[in-house]
């Protein structure tokens, strides 16, 4: 085989390796970006108490499950917090109850549905 053919074959192999490496890096970057984006929770709207807002923890929210709710949509009864829209009762000792960083109620429900099951309920500190 002539030397020019051997050099050309070697150059093709090198180019193929480089292309495969670039494809692998691009694919890996896409996978990491996808998983990183899905691992981020979204932020609560800024309030007077938290002017920069705050982030719902990933364990409660996958980007659309949580939202601030009015204090009239949650009532405190002897058995626990009652979600008025669903009638669901979340006991005071339930692990889904979280302290609200901004002193407002925030409700996280499955898929953010108004008739969904509670994932987390952020409650303001008790006044008593």
Image (cartoon, grey):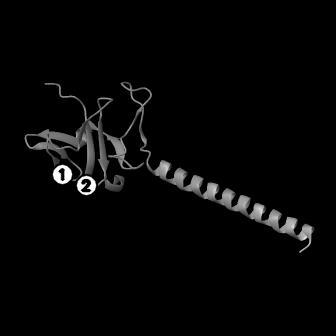
Residue 30, compared with residue 40, is above or below; it is below
- Residue 117: give its label: 2
- The quarter of the rendered structure image containing the N terminus is bottom right
The residue that mark 1 highlights is 88
What's the residue at 27%, 45% (across, down)? 120
Q: Are marks 1 and 2 in contact (CB under 8 Å)?
A: yes
- The quarter of the rendered structure image containing the C terminus is top left
Query: Which element is circle 2 on?
Result: loop
**Left or right, residue 95 beside residue 56:** left
Q: Quadrant of residue 50?
A: top left
What's the residue at 36%, 47% (across, down)? 61
What's the residue at 42%, 35% (across, down)? 45
Query: Which element is circle 1 on?
Result: loop
Circle 2 crowding by C-alpha within 10 Å: few under 14, some 14–19, many from 20 = some
Q: Quadrant of residue 15?
A: bottom right
**Residue 87, percent across and down?**
18, 52
């Amino acid at each position: 085989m002539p030397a020019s053919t051997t050099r050309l074959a070697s150059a093709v192999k090198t180019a193929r390796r480089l292309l495969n490496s670039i494809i692998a890096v691009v694919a890996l970057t896409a996978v990491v970006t996808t998983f990183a984006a899905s691992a981020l929770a979204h932020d609560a709207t800024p309030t007077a108490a938290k002017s920069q807002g705050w982030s719902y923890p990933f364990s409660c929210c996958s980007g659309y499950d949580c939202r601030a709710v009015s204090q009239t949509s949650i009532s405190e009864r002897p058995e626990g917090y009652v979600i008025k829209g669903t009638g669901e009762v979340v006991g005071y000792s339930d692990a889904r109850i979280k302290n609200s960083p901004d002193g407002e109620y925030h409700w996280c429900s499955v898929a953010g549905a108004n008739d969904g099951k509670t994932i987390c309920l952020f409650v303001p500190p008790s006044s008593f």
